[in-house]
Every structure is written in structure tokens, then in C-alpha cells.
Image (spheres, helix red, strand yellow):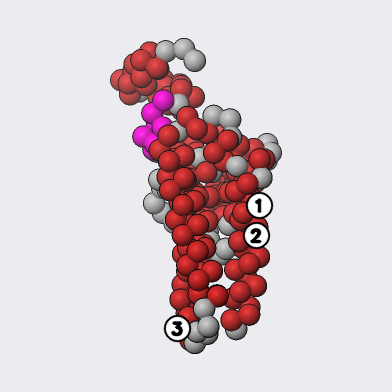
Amino acid sequence: MLNKIIRTYQNTRLATIKKFTNQHYDILDEAGFLDDGYISKKIEGLKIEYAKLDNQIDVLLLSANKDDYTKQKIATLLEQKDDIHLYIAFLSSNSMNSIEFAIQLVQNQKTDFCLCLEALYHFKQNREKDALDLFEKYFMLHQDPLDHFLINKIYGVLLLRYNQIEKAIKFLRIATEKRPDDREVHQLLLQTYEDLGMRDQGKIHQKILDLLGDD
């Protein structure tokens, strides 16, 4: 049992180190990603916490004590590392440039969030119906919107294109709350409200666009 845990740990660690250091997948170097200071700061903190967990596991693996408590402690630390993987995937997938990285980071985890990551990937590959189906599958399982800018934005965009207007507005409005400076979402909401004759609502987004100015 312990040997299996050690092998799992070593394989996971090597794969993660490769992802963190490979220039192609270093999310902190992605173009435009550093503009979101909150996300980059959170990821830096998670990487530090991840290294601490690695150190704790190293100490336990090198210790002479191989009892059940040690095995359980290692298993618990590995679970905490998986939680960090998932959190980093959640944060990094707010950038379309980092979707592949996020998918690879959680590819061995059983989490419904992978449906959203796959949906974003399909959208990126211009497979919009596949993306919509995956989003719908996720939100059939989980009723509450995610605290995630890009998922709300892209799902809202797809809902608009498939004429689910009321539902689209809900998700696009959440997207504006997560990233108020995204002009595209405000423009979509402005046009949608104008098409519905809801000019007072549209004026709110027009004012925001005026404040944001030109790109």
C-alpha cells in the first residue's frame, strides 16, 4: 500500500513540476493573464502551499516510521495537493489561454468541474454545440452559478446564440460582476436589452462602456 502511495506521489510530483516549469504551461507568464492581479497572487500562494505539502510528504517518506498513521497522513497530504490542483485549475481557467493547462492539471480527478473545462476547450475549438451541451450537463447537476468569470461569460454567449435570452442575461450579468472591465460582456448585454426594449437596463451598460473608454 505504501509503495503504491509513494509511486503515485512521485509521478504526480514530476508531472506537476513539469507543468509549473514548462514555459508553454506556465500560467503566470500567459499573455494578458497577469492583468488579473488577484488571480496571479492567489496562484503564487497556492504554489507555495503546494511546495510545503511536498516537503511534509518527503519528511514522512524518509522517516523510519511506516505505521498506519504515517500512511494515512501521506494520503491526507496527497488529497490536499489534489485540492490545490483543482483550485489552480479553477483560477487559471479564467484565461482562455490556460484552458489546456487547467484540463491537464485535473485530468486524473473525478470532478464535475471538468465538464466546464471541456466546454471551454470545445468553445475555443469552435465546437459551440458541444460546448453548450457540456455546460448544460454541468448545470443540470449543479443549479448555482460558479464564481468564475469565463464560464459565466462563455455560457452566456452560447445561450444567447441559441436564443435562451433570459438565461443568457443571468450568466452574463454574473460575468460582469466577476470582471467589470470586460467590454464585450457589457456590449452583449447592451445589445440584448435594446433588442428586448429594456432601454433603462441597457443604459446602465452604455454608461459603463463610456467610463471604460476605448481599448
Sequence-first tag of 2 and 3:
2
Instruction: Please say if 184 is above or below 127.
Output: above
Q: Dot 3 lies on which element?
A: helix
Q: Is 179 inside the magenta-drawn segment? A: yes
Image: magenta residue range: 173-181
Which residue is the site of mark 3?
A: 69
Question: Around disc 3, counting alpha carbons within 10 Å, would you say few (fewer than 14), some (14 to 19), or many (20 or more)?
Answer: few
Question: Around disc 2, counting alpha carbons within 10 Å, would you say few (fewer than 14), some (14 to 19), or many (20 or more)?
Answer: few
Which residue is the site of mark 2?
A: 14
Q: Position of residue 168 (x, y in %)?
A: 46, 37
Instruction: Please say if 208 is above or below 43.
Output: above
Q: Dot 2 lies on which element?
A: helix
Q: Position of residue 19 (x, y in %)?
A: 63, 50
Sequence-first tag of 1 and 3:
1
Q: Is 202 in front, or is 80?
A: 80
Give the residue type at disc 1.
Lys
Which residue is the site of mark 1?
A: 18
